[in-house]
Image (cartoon, rainbow, N blue to C red):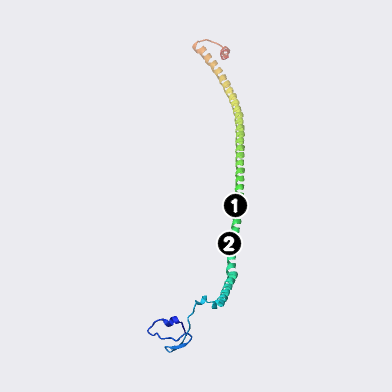
Amino acid sequence: MFVTPAFAQTESPDAVDLPPAGETAELHGETIHVEGEHSTFPPFNTEYYPSQLLWLAITFGIFYLVLKKVILPRIAGVLENRRDRIALDLEAAERMKSDSDEAKAAYEQDLAAARDRAHKIGHEARDSAKTSAEAERKRLDVKLDEELDAAQIRIAAVRDEALKDVGQIAEETADTILREVIRMDVSREDVAGAVTAVRS
């Protein structure tokens, strides 16, 4: 068992006198070896530099190998995956933008074509309606003219028939008046001639 002088100098109820450095002594039934005082802290002692450098090299080598074989490949893989994902996202966004522009252009083109067709259909419908209305008007004019001519013919026939009956009624009435009222004896031919003269 090693005991430093500092330990030996602590005061305690069981304090004993230790022999000089480098010698052994009996303490509570145990043999102790008293060493001399160290002049520096062991890690700063040049005597330990070679072992410290050796362990530093071993530790650095292990750390370098762990970095090179495990940590750095994982970090590189993560960065590569992230770069690929970003590139794919940018490519997809560019493709979607291109598709959107194409769809917008196609929509505007279809809209313009639909407007042109609507205007053309409207003009054609208006011209067709105008033509149909004009043809229907002409047909109705012809029909009305025909019906008017037929009505005039019927009216003329009815008028002639009525005038014919009126002449006969006038002759009979005049003959009756001359005979019954005036007591004149006039032939029927004279009465008919007088009525015809009056009608003319």
Q: Amino acid type of disc 1? A: Lys
In the image, 13 versus 21, the foreground residue is 21
Dot 2: within a 10 Å radius of its alpha carbon, few (fewer than 14), some, or many (20 or more) residues? Answer: few
> Which quarter of the picture shows residue 52?
bottom right
Q: Is residue 154 above or below residue 54?
A: above
Q: Which residue is mark 1?
A: 97
* Label annotation for residue 82: 2
* Label annotation for residue 126: none
Q: What residue is shown at x 59% (from left), y 52% (from top)?
A: 97
> Which quarter of the picture shows residue 17?
bottom left
Q: What residue is shown at x 60% (from left), y 58% (from top)?
A: 87
Whether the residues at callouts 1 and 2 have beta carbons within 8 Å, the answer is no
In the image, 75 versus 163, the foreground residue is 75
Dot 1 or dot 2: first in sequence order is 2
Residue 64 position within the rendered picture, expressed as x and y whole percent measured from the top left? 58, 71
Residue 37 position within the rendered picture, expressed as x and y whole percent measured from the top left? 47, 81
> Could you give the CA–CA distance between mark 1 and mark 2, rounded to whole angstroms?
22 Å
